[in-house]
Image (cartoon, helix red, strand yellow):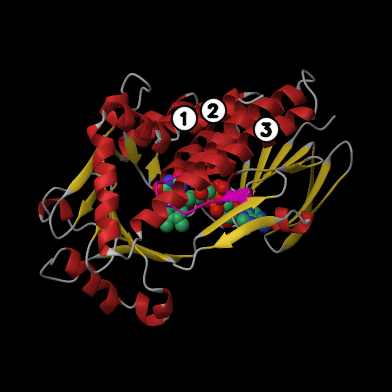
Amino acid sequence: MNDRVIIVGGGPVGLVTALNLVRAGVPVTVLERAAQMHAEPRASTFHAPTLELLDTLGLTEKLIALGRPAPQWQYRMFETGEAAVFDMTLIAHETRYPFRLQCEQFNLVKVAVEALNREAPGAVLFGADVTDFAQSKDGVRVTFTHNNTSQTLDGAWLIAADGAASTVRTKLGISFEGSTYPQVSFTVGTTFPLHDHMTGLLGVNYFWSDFGPWGQFRTGLMWRVGWSPPPDSINEDVLSDDVVQAKLAKICPAGAPYDLITARLYRVHRRIAGTFYQGRIILVGDAAHLNSPTGGFGMNGGVQDAFNLTSKLVKILNGAASEPLLDHYTRQRRSAAVDDIQSTSDTNYRRHREKDADKRREALKDLQAITADPDKHRAYLLDNALITSYRRSEAMS
Ligand SMILES: Cc1cc2nc3c(=O)[nH]c(=O)nc-3n(C[C@H](O)[C@H](O)[C@H](O)COP(=O)(O)OP(=O)(O)OC[C@H]3O[C@@H](n4cnc5c(N)ncnc54)[C@H](O)[C@@H]3O)c2cc1C
């Protein structure tokens, strides 16, 4: 029988899924539309449970070497310097990684592709755009375009890790209910050493100011600065160099134009797939769920999906369990996505974008009250590092 698992999408989630299966001896093909690895930074935060899982694949030390651990992070008033500082060392007994690792998601893609190329040469096919697929009770047939020719590949299972606009989910007619936030996120990256010019910075900073909120994160390579331009100002001007430079100069006058190594505008959604599998086709990562990026949960949740799913799929492929295990996967990971990740990231998103100055002050006081109480502080850290979510969903029957 053909045991091959075909994975659509060579983003972080598809590649981690592939590496897990390769390590279990399962033949895998990843079909990735892009001609080469994406260079877009996008996610920058890796949380503790994800680092523990990736360590089982030997990737975590590599990511730590490429990134920058942030043991403390803060909400901070720009004008007054008042802050609520969260200290991950308080939960050092709960995890081997008591920090948020700030490291661009392209680094995970890179180390995962390197491992796959070493261990399963040819498993990742770039420039392969999946256009169609069919399934029977025994397997799947995937149609894709590669080098301008249409080709097919047969396998036992198809995993859709093809991101937010998933072709597979759409063609299956699986609903993707939810909403799109009115505000977009605009993120830039600069090598300017903001840490030498701004006081009180930590590795992860959520700033409130009279001229709007922004997030400021220091990775191994750059400072990422992200904000939401007003919805009524979204036109080409908002992306113009002058507007971006003026915004950055308000945050920290650099005396010269900032060198911008990335600048991207993103729509922000909160959506969930109606089901995470249909027959022999299974959804993971952004193809299955979307949340606001505030808190850094989307890729982490997707990587956690990948580990949960592959442990079950390997049992199914070995004949040690049957398809109902996929219902278990759906229950566990759908609950993590909806009850924890979407809900916490929505709270974070709304709090950080609060327009009313009095309400922002109240929010800061609430956060300071949490950091002043060791039990509440630890519980907040466990929630916001996805440790509670991961443990709760894994324990679900
Ligand atoms: C501004 C921003 C900041 C973020 N920060 C964080 C963060 O700090 N931490 C965090 O955890 N998450 C964060 N996220 C979310 C994170 O980026 C996503 O959750 C993550 O990329 C999902 O990975 P994925 O592999 O599921 O999908 P993707 O990364 O979207 O990968 C999907 C892949 O499928 C390929 N593909 C699509 N269609 C086809 C097709 N038909 N055939 C073949 N290939 C196809 C695409 O080319 C792509 O490579 C952030 C998101 C944004 C927008």
Q: Is residue 42 visible?
A: no
Q: CA distance from mark 2 to mark 3?
A: 13 Å
Q: Position of residue 153 (x, y in %)?
A: 78, 46
Measuring 61% from the left and 30% from the top, which residue is drawn there? 308
- Whether the residues at callouts 1 and 2 have beta carbons within 8 Å, the answer is yes
Relative to residue 79, is residue 114 depicted above or below? above
Q: Is residue 301 left or right of residue 104?
A: right
Q: Is residue 253 visible?
A: yes
Relative to residue 258, is residue 114 depicted above or below? above
Amino acid type at circle 2 is Arg
Amino acid type at circle 3 is Tyr
Could you say whether the residue bearing mark 3 is in a helix, strand or loop? helix
Given residues 266 and 138, the one toward you in this image is 266
Q: Which secondary structure type mostly characterizes the magenta part of the structure?
A: loop
Amino acid type at circle 1 is Thr
The magenta span reads: 286-298
Q: Ligand 1: does it lie within 8 Å of the C-beta at label 3?
A: no
Given residues 268 and 367, the one toward you in this image is 367
Could you say whether the residue bearing mark 1 is in a helix, strand or loop? helix
Residue on which the image places disc 1: 388
Residue on which the image places disc 3: 329
Residue on which the image places disc 2: 392
